[in-house]
Image (cartoon, helix red, strand yellow):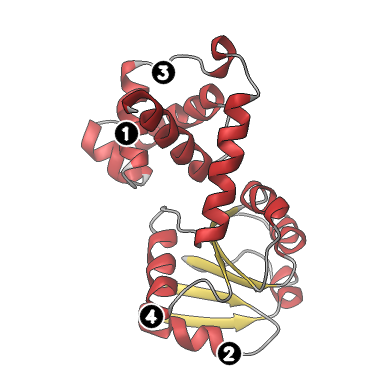
Amino acid sequence: MRVLVISSTGNSLAELLRPCAAALDVRPLLHVLNGGPVDADLVVLHTHAPIRELTALATLPPPRPPVLVVAYAVVPGDVVPILRAGARSLLVEGQYTRADLLDAALATADGHSRMSPVPLSVVVDHVQHRATDRSPALLHQPLTRREHEIMELIAAGEPNAAIAVRLDLAEKTVRNRVSQIYLKLRVNNRTEAIVQWLSRTERRSG
C-alpha cells in the first residue's frame, strides 16, 4: 500500500505506519498542493486544522485517495464538518493505540471507516438529533429491496467492490444505488449512513 502522510511536524506518525506501507512518503501540505494529483492508496492527514486542510485537498485533481485524518484535537462541533469535508476516518491524538492506527489505515484504504470514541459519539448524537427534529413521515423515504441489501452490506463494512461481487452487480450500479441511499437517509457520507442505519435497527429491535 502506498501511503502519503501530510504533516509539518516530522516523521513520528509515519514511523508508526511503516508496517502497513510498502511505500511511505511524508510531505507538508503546501508541497502536496503544488504537486498535482496524489499518487497514493491512502492519505493520512496529521493536522491541527482538519477542515481547512481537507478543503484545500479537495481542490486537487483526481484521483483522490481516501483520507484518514489524525487530528491533534477536535471540538465536537467540528466532527461532522470534518467528515463532510472529505475525511473517511477520524482519529484524535490520545484516543488511539498504534494497533488502532494501523487498523484505521488499512480499513480506510479499503473503503471502510474508523473513528476514535469521542468523534463516534458525536456522530451518533448528531444522527439522533436529526431524527428527533423531523416528523416520522418525513424522516426517510423507503429503501427498495435492493437498496436495503446494499445498505446491510455497507453497515457490515463492505466496500462497493465487494458489494458488487456479492450481489452480482456492476460496481457503477452499486455506486449509483449508494448515492440514492444517501439521499433517502438524508446523510452525506458512508459513516453517517452506517450510524443512521444502525440507530434505526436498534430502535426497531428495542
Identify the disc placed on residue 152: 1
> Which one is in front, 97 or 146?
97
2 or 3: tag closer to the N-terminus: 2
Query: Residue at point 36% right, 40% down?
Result: 155
Q: Nearer the viewer, residue 86 or 164?
A: 86
Q: Residue at x 50, y 68 (%)?
A: 40
Q: Secondary structure at mark 1?
A: helix
Q: Is label 2 or label 4 in front?
A: 2
Alpha carbons under labels 1 and 2: distance apart: 39 Å
Q: Which residue is mark 3?
A: 143
Q: Is residue 134 above or below residue 200?
A: above
| Quarter of the rendering occupied by the N terminus | bottom left
- Element at badge 3? loop
Local secondary structure at mark 2: loop
User: Would residue 125 be seen by someone viewing this image from the given angle?
Assistant: yes
Q: Residue at x 29, y 30 (%)?
A: 169
For mark 1, does the 10 Å Cα neighbourhood hold few (<14), some (14 to 19), or many (20 or more) residues?
Answer: some
Q: Which residue is mark 4?
A: 22
Label 4 element class: loop
Near mark 4 (Cα within 10 A), the count class, few <14, some 14-19 or many ≥20, is few
Q: Label 4 amino acid?
A: Ala
Q: Position of residue 114 (x, y in %)?
A: 45, 58
Three-letter amino acid code at the position of disc 3: Leu
x, y percentage for residue 106?
A: 38, 66
Question: Which residue bears the numbered disc 2?
Answer: 11
Percent of width and height locating residue 13? 54, 83
- Give the quadrant of the C terminus: top left
